[in-house]
Amino acid sequence: MSTTASIFKQLSSARSETQKLLGYINEALSALEGSTMTINTPGTKRTTRSTTTTTNNPPVLTMAARHRISLAQKRRWALIKKTKAA
């Protein structure tokens, strides 16, 4: 009976390790496909955000940052226009 019990215990642990490895493989495939990755660990379930951008939460720039970017781009255009004229 002890032999059967030890074989059962080994097979059970091998099955749980294989399921864990399959979870990691599925995560890797999902990451390569560009979809949402989910991480399942015993006792916890966490999800990371999708690799695609959402329109619900666009990145926010302050007005001052937009103004600085605008001024920098105008300087670039002026430099290009000045070099073409010369």
Image (cartoon, rainbow, N blue to C red):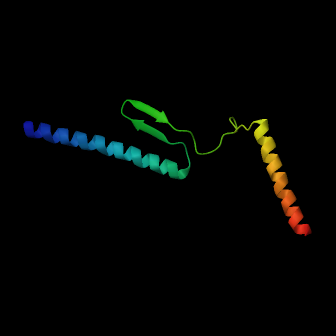
Q: Residue at x 29, y 40 (%)?
A: 16
Establish if 16 lies above or below 29: above
Q: Residue at x 47, y 51 (%)?
A: 29
Q: How many marks?
A: 0
Q: Position of residue 43 (x, y in %)?
A: 37, 29
The C terminus, quarter of image:
bottom right
Q: Residue at x 13, y 36 (%)?
A: 5
The N terminus, quarter of image:
top left
- Camera-nearest residue between 79 and 20: 79
Spot the residue most to the bottom. Answer: 86
Q: Quarter of the image holding residue 83?
A: bottom right
Q: Please state if 39 lies on the left or on the right of 58 as rendered.
A: left
Spot the residue most to the right. Answer: 85
Q: Position of residue 85 (x, y in %)?
A: 92, 68
Q: Position of residue 46 (x, y in %)?
A: 47, 34
Q: Please state if 20 lies on the left or on the right of 37 as rendered.
A: left
Establish if 1 lies above or below 29: above
